[in-house]
Amino acid sequence: DTEVTQTPKHLVMGMTNKKSLKCEQHMGHRAMYWYKQKAKKPPELMFVYSYEKLSINESVPSRFSPECPNSSLLNLHLHALQPEDSALYLCASSQLPGALNEQFFGPGTRLTVL
Amino acid sequence: RKEVEQDPGPFNVPEGATVAFNCTYSNSASQSFFWYRQDCRKEPKLLMSVYSSGNEDGRFTAQLNRASQYISLLIRDSKLSDSATYLCVVNRDSGAGSYQLTFGKGTKLSVIP
């Protein structure tokens, strides 16, 4: 199994809603990542979890709250988002943390904030 | 100077052509290099890592020139299915357990019948 899965595939939410994005991998990878990608732009790193601990937070607003319940799962909790947060949210994993490791991406959740 | 720069294209090439993409990076401390491809409205997929000695995978050849700080990708015998955006990715450890993964903006390739 060399797959990273993400749910839901699409999400529409209002600015007052609370929702969560989920990511799962069963490759035994010990680093997991959240990225945000706007149309016609490259992915931008948001968070990195290394061995289930948050190791990098790229100055992301607190309305995005990551969680890593175990080594296979990564969540992104959303609350009071703004329309400009509409984007493709990508999860990725790598075997180990660190610059030398290849990252594998999930299919993403396409988020629309109304 | 942007940290990772690519020609955005588009590159429109006929089937069977050979096409080359270049990418330059500004930080000489960069440690690892990758090419990803991304189809429209899909996730990036790892195409290949780029090693100092150069590496080949079928029709794809990647080269790294550390002295000049550029990376290249050569695609031979282009197929229609090669049409995608190709992202150059550079990674480096930035200390204290942190690291900096930087994507180029991508080069769009369209292979025409």
Image (cartoon, coloured by chain):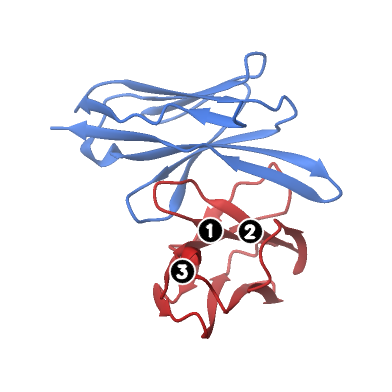
* Residue lying at 26% horizontally and 29% vertically, measured from the top left: B78
User: SS for tag 3?
Assistant: helix
| Marks 2,1: beta carbons within 8 A | yes
Q: Splitting the image into 4 quarters, where does residue B101 fall?
A: top right
Residue B93 location (% of width, % of height): 77, 41
Left or right of A109 in this view: A52? right
Q: Residues within 10 Å of mark 3 (few under 14, many from 20)?
A: some
| Marks 3,1: beta carbons within 8 A | no
Q: CA distance from mark 3 to mark 2?
A: 18 Å
* Residue lying at 43% horizontally and 62% vertically, measured from the top left: A107
> In this view, which residue lies farthest toward the right?
B96
Read off the residue under disc 3: A83
Q: Nearer the viewer, residue B5 or A107?
A: B5
* Residue A22, disc: none
Q: Residues within 10 Å of mark 1 (few under 14, many from 20)?
A: many
Q: Decide: is B30 above or below A13.
A: above
Identify residue type, mark 1.
Lys
* Residue lying at 72% horizontally and 24% vertically, measured from the top left: B28
Identify residue type, mark 3.
Pro
Residue A39 location (% of width, % of height): 40, 52
Callout in the foreground (3, 1) = 3
> In this view, which residue lies farthest toward the top?
B67
Mark 3 or 2, nearer chain start? 2
Residue B98 location (% of width, % of height): 78, 49
* Residue A36, disc: 1
Q: CA distance from mark 3 to mark 1?
A: 14 Å
Q: Chain A appears in which tint?
A: red
Read off the residue under disc 2: A46
Tag 2 subunit: A
Identify residue type, mark 2.
Met
Quadrant assignment for the N terminus of chain B = top right
